[in-house]
Image: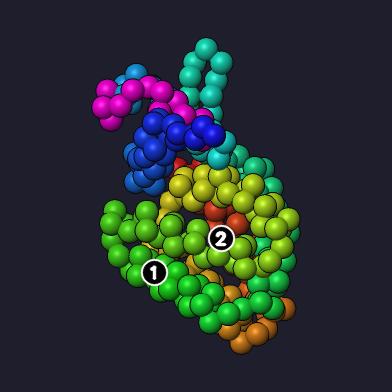
């Protein structure tokens, strides 16, 4: 019986995906900027094929867009309406997920959440240039871990389908010191409610967290528009 050999390009495409995502996380690509595959190929010293595969994956997340006859471009900033609708979707999903996860806690799960909260707190106190990638990674870990623990594949799949849009929200959001400290405190409140077995309280704290994130993002947009 013939064995199927793994594609030689796939590991390189995965690596290019991580490289490009890292560049997004480091703020090297501004919203709306064109992505020239030829220039990227020369800069990263790889052929265009794995880059195209990586960009196709990024397109699926919503971080980049492909325009006919023009190629790829970094996704623009959310409009105010898009931002509101994204947060409204999260308000439907995430309190339900955390309520279910709070009914199924384990010591290992709670420890993983606590570690992500501690990492968020450390990053909030560190210089922005050194911490932004780790900060958003810790934020993502917290929410994804809850999605996995809720033991409802339909809720988890629905949340993961928003993943690229949430990531886009994270990457294109300014991160001031006060804004960074607030989510860490809000995550801690969710964790404490879950650790005490208070599923209703955990859902309430998650709802408050997302509402506050929505308010912070809208305030940032208004401040930019006023400048």
Residue 183, image x, y percentages: 50, 67
Residue 50, image x, y percentages: 40, 28
Which quadrant would residue 87 be assigned to in this image?
bottom right
Instruction: Tell me if residue 202 comes above or below residue 28 in the rendering.
Output: below
Q: Nearer the viewer, residue 222 or 6?
A: 6
Instruction: Tell me if residue 223 comes above or below residue 95 in the rendering.
Output: above
| The label number, if any, that marks residue 57 in the structure image | none
Left or right: where 46 falls relative to 146: left
Q: Quick one: SS at disc 2?
A: helix
Residue at label 2? 144
Q: Nearer the viewer, residue 17 or 36?
A: 17
For the stretch drawn in magenta, what is the main secondary structure? helix
Residue range (magenta)? 42-57
Q: Residue at x 30, y 65 (%)?
A: 126
Residue 11, image x, y percentages: 39, 38
Instruction: Tell me if residue 135 comes above or below residue 111 in the rendering.
Output: above
| The label number, if any, that marks residue 119 in the structure image | 1
Local crowd size for mark 1, using a 10 Å CA cut-off: few (<14), some (14–19), many (≥20) = some
Query: Disc 1 vs disc 2: Cβ atoms closer than 8 Å?
Result: no
Report the quarter where the N terminus lies. Answer: top right
**Residue farthest along the bottom direction in this orientation:** 196
Q: Residue at x 37, y 58 (%)?
A: 134
**Residue farthest along the top direction in this orientation:** 69
Instruction: Tell me if residue 19 comes above or below residue 211 in the rendering.
Output: above
Residue 196, image x, y percentages: 61, 87
Q: Give the mark, 1 or 2, whose residue is nearer the N terminus.
A: 1
Local crowd size for mark 2, using a 10 Å CA cut-off: few (<14), some (14–19), many (≥20) = some
């Amino acid at each position: 019986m013939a064995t199927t050999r793994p594609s030689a390009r796939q590991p390189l495409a995965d690596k290019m995906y991580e490289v490009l995502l890292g560049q997004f996380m480091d703020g090297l690509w501004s919203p709306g900027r064109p992505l020239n595959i030829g220039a990227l190929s020369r800069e990263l010293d790889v052929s265009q094929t794995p880059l195209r595969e990586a960009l196709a994956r990024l397109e699926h997340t919503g971080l980049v867009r492909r325009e006919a006859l023009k190629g790829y471009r970094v996704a623009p900033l959310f409009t105010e309406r898009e931002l509101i609708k994204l947060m409204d979707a999260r308000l439907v999903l995430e309190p339900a997920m955390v309520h279910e996860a709070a009914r199924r806690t384990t010591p290992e799960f709670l420890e993983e959440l606590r570690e992500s909260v501690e990492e968020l707190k450390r990053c909030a106190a560190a210089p922005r240039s050194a911490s932004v990638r780790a900060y958003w990674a810790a934020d993502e870990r917290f929410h994804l871990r809850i999605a996995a623990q809720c033991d409802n594949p339909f809720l988890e799949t629905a949340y993961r389908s928003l993943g690229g849009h949430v990531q886009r929200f994270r990457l294109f959001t300014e991160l001031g010191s006060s804004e960074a400290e607030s989510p860490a405190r809000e995550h801690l409140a969710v964790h404490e409610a879950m650790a005490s077995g208070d599923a209703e309280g955990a859902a309430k704290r998650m709802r408050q967290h997302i509402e506050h994130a929505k308010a912070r993002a809208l305030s940032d947009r208004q401040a930019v528009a006023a400048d």
